[in-house]
Amino acid sequence: MAFFAKQKKTCPAVGAETSARTGSEGFYRISPASEAGERELYSSLRENVPIIDACIGKIIRLVGGMKVEADDPDFQPFLDRFIKSVRVGASGKGLQTFLDSYLDSLLTYGCALGEIVYDRSRRKIAGLYVAPVKRMEIKGGPEPLSRSYRTVGSDAPLRLSHPENLIFTALSPTPESPCGVSVLRGLPSLSAILLRIYECIGQNFDRVGNVRYAVTYKPSAENGDAAFAGERAKQIAKEWSSGMSAMKNGDIRDFVAVGDVGIKVIGADNQIIDTEVPVRQLLEQLIAKLGIPPFLLGLSWSTSERMSVQQSDILTSELEYYRRILEPAITQVCETYLRLCGSSGGVNVTWESINLQDESELALARLRNAQARSVELSNKEKEEKMSV
C-alpha cells in the first residue's frame, strides 16, 4: 500500500488534448470565428428561448446523484475521496460536477466528450475535463467501429497521443448520425415562430402600450380664427409639450385651450392580437419534445391529478434512460482510478431514487399507512383475546 503514501513532490498536470490551444502551444487552433453549424444553432436556441434552457436544467438536476461502490472494499475509502475531490476543468470539483457538465453537453449537442487528465508522471489522475463539443466535429472513422475527431472547419483529424483517455457518449445514435442526436433537433423552426410572435408583441406595445396623443385644433370660420390658426397651433403645441414634460418630473398640470381642441389617444381603437393560443400551442410542442411536465416549469395549465401522475411516470423513465447512458462514463473514470491504485476489480453504480411527488403527499401517505397498520394490530389483538 505504499502507493497511497503522501508524496513529497506533486507533479503538474498534463494538458488536455481536447482543450483549445494557440498555435505556439499545440497542434491546432480553435478560432472564435469558426463555422457555426448545427451545434452553434443549439447554443443560440438555449440563449434565446428560456423555457428550453429551463427544461435542460431541470433534467440535469432531476437525474440526481449516485454512489459508486468498488468490488474490493479495501479501496472504497480512496474511491470515495476521489469522487468528492477530483478537479473538473478550471473551477469545478467532484465527479458529480463533471457529470452535470457532461450531461449538459450530451443533451444540447447530442454527444459529450470528456478526458481524463493525468499528471506528468502519468501515475495519478490530475482531473477531468469536458471538451467544448460545439468547436469539434466527431465523425465515423474509416472502420465501422471507429471514430475521428476534428476541429470545426478542419479536414485533418486530431492527432491524439492517448485516445484511451477520452470519454465519449452519444445520445440516440442512428446510422445517419452515429455520433448522436440532440434533444433539440426539430425545435429551431418552432422556436423561430415563437420568437417572431414575442418580437411582434414587443413592437405592438411600443406602438400602443406607450400612449401617444393626437391634439387637433379646428379653427372657427365665423370668428376669424382661421387667420391665426398657425400661431394658435404653435401655442397649443408649446403648452402641451410643457405639460407632458412636467408629468415626467412627477408634476400634474392641466392643459387649458380656447376653441375647438380635440385630444385623442393614438391607437386606442385598435386591439392587440390575442397570442395566448398560438404561444401555448408552440410551448406544448417544445415541452413535449423535451419531456418535462408543465407543472415542473411553473405553467398553470389545466390538468388532472391522474394526468400529472402519468406525466411524472413518463419523466421518470426518461431520467432512467439518461442514467443508463451516463453509467459507462462513470465506470470508465472510476475503474481507471482503481487501476492506478492497484486494484483490478470493477465498480457498481447505485443511483438515488427518483421521486417527483410532493412532500405533503408523501407525508399523508405515510400517515395513512401508519393508521392502517395500527388498525390491523388492534384487530389482531381483539381476535387473539376472543380466541382465548
Image (cartoon, helix red, strand yellow):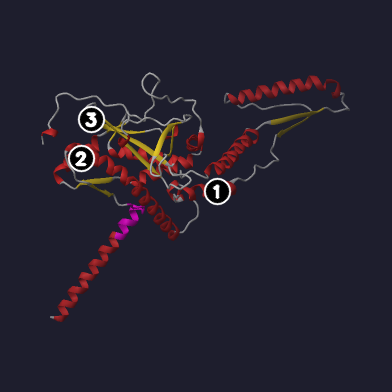
Mark-to-mark CA distance, 1 and 2: 51 Å
Q: Secondary structure at mark 2?
A: helix
Whole-percent x and y of residue 110?
A: 43, 42
Residue 330 pos. (x, y %): 29, 43
CB within 8 Å, label 1 to label 3 = no
User: Which mark, by number, is residue 122?
Assistant: 3
Decide: is 34 above or below 190: above
Neighbor class of circle 1 (other Cα within 10 Å; few <14, some 14-19, many 20+) is few
Q: Nearer the viewer, residue 120 or 52?
A: 120
Q: CA distance from mark 3 to mark 2?
A: 14 Å
Residue of label 1: 280
State the residue at coordinates (48%, 49%).
289
Crowdedness of circle 3 by 10 Å Cα count: few (<14), some, many (20+)? few
- Relative depth, front residue between 86 and 337: 337
**Mark 1 belongs to which amino acid?**
Arg
Does the image show residue 299? Answer: no
Q: Indicate the amino acid at tag 3.
A: Arg
Question: Closer to the N terminus: mark 1 or mark 2?
Answer: 1
From this viewpoint, is residue 335 visible? Answer: yes
**Residue 41 left/right relative to 144:** right
| Residue underneath mark 2 | 338
Q: Secondary structure at mark 1?
A: helix
Range covered by the magenta-colored residues? 354-365
Q: Quadrant of residue 170?
A: top left
